[in-house]
Amino acid sequence: MRLVLLGAPGSGKGTQANSLSEYYKVKKVSLGDILREEVKKNSTLGKRVKDYMDKGLLVPDDVVGSVIEKNLIEDSFILEGYPRNINQAKHLDSFLNDKGKSLDAVVYLDVDKPTVLNRLQFRRICNNCGALYHLVNLPPKKDGFCDICNLPLVQRDDDTPEVVSRRLEVFIEEIKPIVDFYQGQGKLIRVDSNGDKDEVFERLKKLIENGEYIDIRRN
Ligand code: AMP
């Protein structure tokens, strides 16, 4: 399985990538998580990307391109957060192509703006393990603490209203050429990503198990 999840901030890419990865035992690669980890470590890479992330801007393509090359080493993967512009989509294609591989399918998680705003406003994460929560729809068992690590949950620095609106602008600006690119390859599948985590996951599972995904792979 070589799958990409595309979608706006708050469309559920991270959440669904986690569920798919766990269910199908396929490695998840989340570029946002990798970058956040580097920022937390204050590494050279972290220092380089922090300002872009804080402002809700895309990190330059050459920087994220080499991060992807280092992390996309397994034969099967569920990739989320990359590509985020057409240049990155082409880079990913040629990187895989050089290894004699290609993507099986690209899932576009389609979501309404009010859902996005609600999810981002109420999103909390565990800085230690990256677990995701929603204060209303997916609250932790103990108020304010991660179910797994028992450490305090935080709001992402870029989930503030100003940064969210910048991230949405960037998404709207960049997504169409990516969608056209994968649609042209016959690999794009749209999935309604409104609703709760389990509902969306059921839609994704059905799509994979009904063979729609496999048909795409065979083409
Ligand atoms: P995410 O966790 O996917 O919402 O990503 C958080 C932030 O990391 C983004 O707002 C960007 O600043 C940066 N980022 C993540 N993925 C990419 C990418 N493919 N290209 C450039 N910047 C990225």
Image (spheres, rainbow, N blue to C red):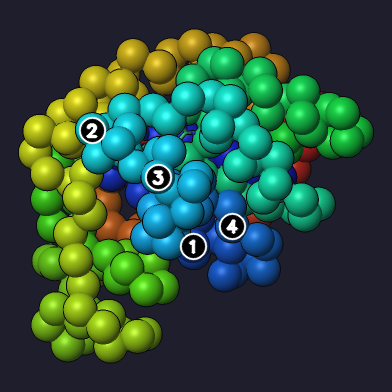
Question: Which of the numbered marks, if any, corresponds to residue 18?
Answer: 1
Q: Is mark 2 within 8 Å of ligand 1?
A: yes
Mark 2 and mark 1 residues within 8 Å of each other at the beta carbon: no
Q: Nearer the viewer, residue 206 or 141?
A: 141
Does the CB distance between marks 2 and 4 fall below 8 Å? no
SS for tag 4?
strand
Q: Which residue is mark 2?
A: 55
**First-in-chain label (1 vs 3):** 1
- The relative height of residue 117 versus residue 43 in the rendered view (above or below) is above
Q: Amino acid at mark 4?
A: Lys
Q: Position of residue 115 (x, y in %)?
A: 18, 42
Secondary structure under tag 1 reads helix
Gap in angstroms between the C-alphas marked 1 and 3:
27 Å
The residue singled out by tag 4 in the image is 28
Q: Amino acid at mark 1?
A: Asn
Q: Amino acid at mark 2?
A: Lys
Residue 200 image position (x, y, % from top left): 39, 53
Task: Judge: label 1 CB < 8 Å from ligand 1.
Answer: no
Question: For mark 3, what is the residue?
Answer: 47
Q: Is residue 204 left or right of residue 68?
A: left
The percent coordinates of residue 177 (x first, y second) are 49, 11
